[in-house]
Amino acid sequence: MKKELTTRQNEIVDAALRLIAEKGMRNLTIRHLSQALGVTDAALYYHFHDKVEIVQALVGRFEADADNIEPLHGWTAIEAALVHRTELVLATPDLARVVFAEELFQGDSEVEQILFGMMQRHHKVMLKHFREAIEAGEIRGDIPMDTLFRLILGPLRLLIKQWGMSHGAFDLREERQHLLDSMKILLSVKP
Amino acid sequence: MKKELTTRQNEIVDAALRLIAEKGMRNLTIRHLSQALGVTDAALYYHFHDKVEIVQALVGRFEADADNIEPLHGWTAIEAALVHRTELVLATPDLARVVFAEELFQGDSEVEQILFGMMQRHHKVMLKHFREAIEAGEIRGDIPMDTLFRLILGPLRLLIKQWGMSHGAFDLREERQHLLDSMKILLSVKP
Amino acid sequence: MKKELTTRQNEIVDAALRLIAEKGMRNLTIRHLSQALGVTDAALYYHFHDKVEIVQALVGRFEADADNIEPLHGWTAIEAALVHRTELVLATPDLARVVFAEELFQGDSEVEQILFGMMQRHHKVMLKHFREAIEAGEIRGDIPMDTLFRLILGPLRLLIKQWGMSHGAFDLREERQHLLDSMKILLSVKP
Amino acid sequence: MKKELTTRQNEIVDAALRLIAEKGMRNLTIRHLSQALGVTDAALYYHFHDKVEIVQALVGRFEADADNIEPLHGWTAIEAALVHRTELVLATPDLARVVFAEELFQGDSEVEQILFGMMQRHHKVMLKHFREAIEAGEIRGDIPMDTLFRLILGPLRLLIKQWGMSHGAFDLREERQHLLDSMKILLSVKP
DNA sequence: CATGAATGAGACTTCATTCAT
DNA sequence: CATGAATGAAGTCTCATTCAT
């Protein structure tokens, strides 16, 4: 299912990501992309059949990285997931402004579905970890699952979005740590 | 500063909002808009000088509604703000999928600035309420302000986004209540 | 043939002239014109049936002024004509950048004809004065008539054009006098 | 600075020149141009980034030709310049009705500047030749420089404009010769 | 692998004009 | 006298894509 990308294809996806991060999805046009790469429009069609194919490869990036999480459990897994997200964002800041920005692809139904699938799977995995954490007595169990998901992922999303919109004006790792610390305190089971 | 819109102008903004909500920002073209209104492209230019002007009027809607919050304080004000947001979303569902979707306007620097200003002001107001709530002993004071903001607004944003993306598949009021209840419990000062 | 213009019509023509002088013929649009006058587009159609009618009235201005030359003869008439032109230009500088700019109306065949007619008549009158001046021994007679016309009118046109393009940067009267003096010297019959 | 044009670009500029010559600047639209070339509007944008770029290339034509004047001096250089102009006009009659028609570009501030620069340089060169001619005793020295410029270039401009407007109804070379002869006589130093 | 040339659809915008009020 | 609302044609430009070389 997942196609291996050639070197050139990866270069193209990199450039595409850069364009989107810079000026949004509308900035991702075949001409801009080819100019960024120093080739002709037509040249891109040798590497990808479609523009859709490029965007799909781009979205695939998120997934590729997201899958490499080690098999942790409970609160440890939750913390790892949040850390992983922010580290990913720090590693490829262009991704930072794109990930969590599902609206960007609104209308691109092909991409929308891919993203929706990703989100669903992620959601499922997280819920599993929540249950584990509750069973292990790591976090309190009196909060509805969906609400819990929002309480944990919502702040993370907002944090990353703020960081992206401010063009990295604050220390993401530090703020992420504040977030994790506070969550730990708030969610821990009271004696 | 804020321009009063004519009846027709409001009709146009309504239609624009509908278009965006349906298929995203890319769906908001002058042609689509005029077709939705049953007139020619050119007709719109009688009412607005620019497409930008239309989008600005549209963004102004958020602001207009956001300003009408009663002068509450502390946790009450925070709760009211969250309730107000969700009620706004319920009242004009088209707005729902647009609000909190700053990325939609990424690249549209004119609009970006307006939104940025709105966010800044909102942020400031919320921080004031947080401080009041802490002083009043309504919520605990050991969480950094910015983190507190993310912990409260992040979940709300995610909730509204989920509701929008699912096309209203769940009861927004109910879930919002769960969120508020949980927040209250989590943030309350422990004896 | 020549229609008397109402007060409002004259105001409109004035504004039209100003627009053309400012940014060229392409700047003369009904909307710009109406905006300059502080009314709606539609309002202009009460005063003129057509845009063509406005332009015709505008061109008529040149003619109107050009006709009022006193019945002089010979070199005196020639000098008077040149003086008259420059004075006209000084009196209504907007006209300055339009008059002698037949190209501006190229394509506007209706106007082109009017202008062509004006030029023809002017040409004829000037030739008559040339002949008188030669017969009177005021200027030498060994220059072909058409060449003489170019030698006298060409410099004047260039002078006015330079003045217009420089936005009145030099003293038109002074330079015109230099021109007349030099012409007198050059063309006078040698002993 | 001066960009080399491709074959296709030159074809486009040729067509553009033809369109302007035929019906004036307003006739130079992308659609007309592409139709004249038998292609789509969009095709032109492969060769030129802008419509402005096309016009600039077009204006560059004047300059290109104007620069190739041999290094002559004094009256010989002046005569050569006038001859060159008329020959240029005869060689490319389309240029004829455009050259000396600065008004055509009024409002096109980009082009206006290019033209203004060209005029300035031309003016400077001519003044130099005037001085040389005076020093060499070829022409009289009692006429102000600027006036001299107008006396010589003005008639030439008018001649070319008349020829262009009459669609080549008379023998340009013959009339130009009359002009030169007369000028020589008038301006020569009297014994 | 890439370029040169083109296309058709559609984007935003301006223009002159009309008509009912 | 004027406005409010609209129209149809035209203008400039961008976009994704194709095809021959």
Image (tube, coloured by chain):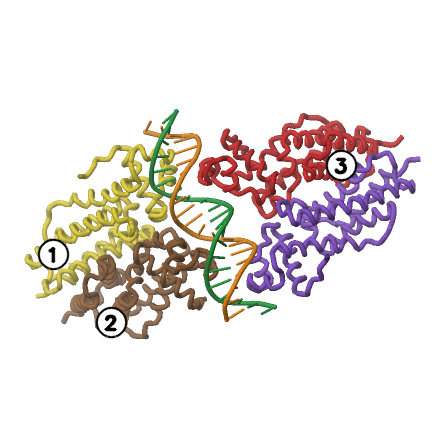
Chain colours: A yellow, B brown, C purple, D red, E orange, F green
Q: Which residue is mark 2?
A: B75
Q: Secondary structure at mark 2?
A: helix
Residue ranking furthest to the left: A135
* CA gap, disc 2 and disc 3: 87 Å
* CA gap, disc 3 and disc 1: 93 Å
Q: Secondary structure at mark 1?
A: helix
Q: Which amino acid type corresponds to the residue marked 3 in the rendered image?
A: Ile
Q: Which residue is mark 1?
A: A130
For disc 3, the neighbor class at 10 Å (few under 14, some 14 to 19, many from 20) is: many
* Picture quarter with the N terminus of chain A: top left
| In-image side of A188 versus B134 (left or right) | left
Q: Which amino acid type corresponds to the residue marked 1 in the rendered image?
A: Phe
Which label sits on residue D40?
Answer: none
Q: How many marks?
A: 3
Residue C55 point in image, percent of width and height? 64, 54
Q: Which amino acid type corresponds to the residue marked 2 in the rendered image?
A: Trp
Q: Which residue is mark 3?
A: D152
> Marks 3 and 1: same chain?
no
